[in-house]
Image: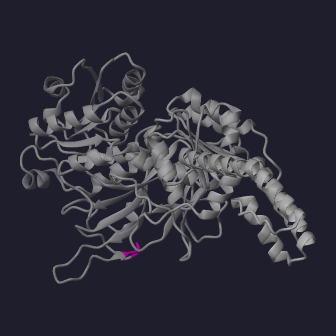
């Protein structure tokens, strides 16, 4: 049994050594004021040292890094699993994460466990009460696709068509500024009226038009089999075009020779017999293609012509047959490999077909956006999935110009690079920008790179025009942190190295928010000197359902309205602002003690 409630000053256990573990630990300690024990195989690793550095940045001793050669019950007990509000298993090892989740469920049944899973068919079997299964790529893929297409980011607010848009899309009715920048590039999240002078709006919250096609919100757990339309088949015209490409001049030359032979024979027959053109053509085709019985009564010219046609056809027909068979075989092989069948333009090139890259390819294909997938390995997970969806696949090193040209990057609208190596990713980005672009192609190639370091992301934006550097761990960390503290995050809104979250917060009986007005939910402050921004904006209220059948409505914030227990607030906030609102919406400590059994975490989940 755990003896710590979720929320501020609670204890958490994080198992993992990587960028997601680092960002998650940072969020839990600096944004949600918890204490964290991180279990790693090597205390001297880069991310373990960066986690310890958070303590030296003025956060006290909130983080303890525990080195464990073997992840067993003793190691988890030493990390404080028995007193923890939640544990997160974020190693890049599905088997190890599942084994640890089962161990935690057996040893501490009341502990809330959040598990990072790549194989989501496995994750669905594991997910149940007090065990939340998440995929970092499920949260990152929609934002990366939106960045590549410069499309809208949809916010899932019931009965509202709210979208986050860039400043160049000013035709939509704007509700508020989400991000703004100063002249020196400093980003301000949720600026108020006093902060706006001197700032340039960059990301706005707007109302989409009724006829706007909105993108997907986030990718859910994927099905066991890739969902390809069973009626989806290659068009006959596409097959013929491919046959023409593979057979080329050989087929044209063979067909031309055969046609000349038949026409010469038909003209000779007409002149010799005086028959109609149809009859002469008939007399010429028979000996050319199938041979014919000898006619002893025919005149010498006809006999000679039939002999010549038969002899020539013996040589030409096998040649034509060979060319056609070779073309069909090569066409089928080309279709099976999935390589681009013809020049492409205004498409998106996705490099890296791991878990994240596969999701991006799926998302683009669902939207009807032309896409070409590239990976260095034929055995990559996403290669088979892309081919099943008839998405062209190029196998090769994307740092080489030949590979990029095979993917027609010179006429693409965007390239998304989500390979695992940082140096490889950056090298591909620079290589893609170096490919000359034809005059009729989009002026600039939109470049979206998967990077883990925010300083590196900033430098890439400066060196590569029209580029964005995004990290799946950066986009996914708020979701994992929210799952650990028991609060559901509905969406994330990233901009450069900042992120806002859309969340639902339930007002508890006896909390400070009960009987307050909607304006009290809009926070503008900071945690201490130079601390994190504590900011939030109320978007909508879902009223408490009534036993009589009333309530349960989504309403706009308005003056004169008072908040009531069991109302649900839909807010957009910084992570520090979300923590503050959660404190304000929570029941007093004595009420939680009375309502919860000893050691049971406080439950403030959303509707």
**In the rendered view, would you say 424 is above or below 238?**
above
Task: Find out whether residue 486 is within the magenta segment.
Answer: no
| Residue 150 placement: quadrant | bottom right
The answer to whether residue 544 shows anywhere in this view is yes
Residue 303 position in % (x across, y down): 84, 62
Residue 90 position in % (x across, y down): 32, 35
- Please identify the quadrant where the N terminus is shown: top left
Residue 518 position in % (x across, y down): 37, 68
Q: Main secondary structure of the magenta part?
A: loop
Q: Nearer the viewer, residue 44 or 359?
A: 359
Q: Nearer the viewer, residue 146 or 411?
A: 411
- Residue appearing at x 79%, y 69% in the figure: 283
Task: Find out whether residue 558 is within the magenta segment.
Answer: yes
Give the magenta-colored segment's residue range. Answer: 555-559
The residue positioned farthest toward the right in the image shown: 271
The residue positioned farthest toward the top in the image shown: 44
The answer to whether residue 441 shows anywhere in this view is no
Q: Nearer the viewer, residue 129 or 254?
A: 254
- Residue appearing at x 60%, y 63% in the figure: 236
Q: Is residue 336 left or right of residue 119?
A: right
Q: Is residue 261 left or right of residue 317?
A: right
- Residue appearing at x 25%, y 17% in the figure: 69
Q: Is residue 495 left or right of residue 111?
A: right
């Amino acid at each position: 049994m755990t003896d710590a409630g979720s929320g501020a000053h609670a204890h958490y256990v994080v198992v993992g050594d990587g960028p997601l573990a680092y960002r998650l630990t940072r969020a839990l300690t600096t944004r949600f004021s918890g204490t964290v024990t991180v279990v790693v195989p090597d205390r001297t690793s880069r991310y373990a040292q960066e986690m310890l550095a958070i303590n030296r940045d003025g956060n006290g001793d909130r983080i303890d890094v525990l080195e464990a050669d073997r992840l067993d019950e003793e190691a988890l007990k030493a990390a404080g699993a028995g007193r923890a509000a939640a544990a997160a298993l974020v190693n890049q090892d599905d088997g190890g994460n599942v084994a640890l989740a089962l161990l935690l469920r057996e040893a501490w049944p009341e502990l809330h466990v959040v598990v990072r899973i790549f194989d989501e068919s496995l994750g669905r079997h594991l997910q149940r009460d007090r065990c939340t299964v998440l995929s970092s790529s499920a949260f990152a893929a929609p934002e990366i696709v939106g960045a590549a297409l410069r499309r809208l980011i949809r916010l899932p607010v019931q009965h509202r068509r709210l979208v986050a848009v860039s400043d160049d899309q000013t035709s939509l009715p704007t509700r508020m500024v989400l991000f703004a920048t100063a002249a020196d590039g400093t980003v301000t999240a949720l600026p108020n009226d006093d902060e706006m002078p001197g700032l340039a709006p960059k990301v706005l919250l707007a109302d989409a038009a009724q006829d706007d096609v909105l993108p997907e919100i986030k990718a859910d757990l994927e099905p066991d089999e890739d969902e390809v339309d069973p009626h989806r088949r290659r068009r006959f015209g596409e097959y013929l075009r491919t046959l023409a490409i593979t057979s080329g001049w050989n087929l044209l030359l063979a067909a031309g020779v055969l046609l000349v032979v038949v026409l010469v024979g038909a003209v000779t027959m007409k002149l010799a017999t005086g028959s109609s053109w149809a009859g002469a053509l008939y007399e010429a085709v028979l000996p050319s293609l199938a041979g014919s019985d000898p006619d002893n009564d025919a005149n010498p010219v006809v006999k000679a012509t039939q002999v010549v046609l038969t002899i020539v056809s013996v040589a030409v027909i096998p040649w034509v047959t060979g060319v056609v068979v070779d073309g069909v075989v090569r066409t089928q092989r080309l279709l099976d490999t999935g390589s681009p069948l013809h020049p492409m333009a205004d498409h998106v090139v996705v490099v890296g077909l791991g878990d994240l890259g596969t999701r991006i390819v799926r998302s683009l294909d669902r939207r009807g956006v032309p896409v070409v997938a590239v990976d260095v390995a034929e055995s990559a997970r996403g290669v088979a999935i892309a081919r099943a969806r008839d998405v062209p696949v190029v196998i090769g090193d994307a740092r080489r110009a030949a590979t990029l040209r095979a993917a027609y990057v010179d006429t693409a609208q965007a390239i998304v690079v989500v390979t695992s190596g940082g140096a490889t990713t950056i090298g591909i980005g620079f290589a893609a920008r170096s490919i000359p672009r034809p005059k009729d192609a989009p002026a600039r190639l939109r470049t979206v790179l998967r990077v883990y370091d925010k300083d590196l992301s900033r430098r890439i934006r400066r060196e590569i025009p029209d580029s964005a550097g995004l990290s799946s761990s950066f986009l996914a960390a708020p979701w994992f942190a929210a799952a650990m503290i028991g609060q559901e995050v509905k969406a994330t809104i990233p901009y450069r190295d900042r992120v806002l979250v859309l969340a639902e917060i339930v007002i508890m009986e006896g909390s400070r928010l009960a009987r307050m007005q909607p304006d009290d939910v809009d926070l503008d402050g900071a945690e201490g000197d130079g601390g994190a921004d504590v900011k939030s904006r109320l978007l909508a209220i879902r009223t408490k359902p009534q036993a009589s059948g009333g309530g349960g409505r989504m309403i706009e914030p308005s003056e004169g309205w008072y908040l009531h227990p069991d109302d649900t607030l839909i807010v957009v906030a910084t992570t520090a602002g979300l923590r503050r609102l959660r404190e304000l919406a929570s029941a007093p400590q004595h009420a939680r003690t009375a309502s919860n059994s000893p050691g049971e975490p406080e439950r403030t989940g959303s509707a």
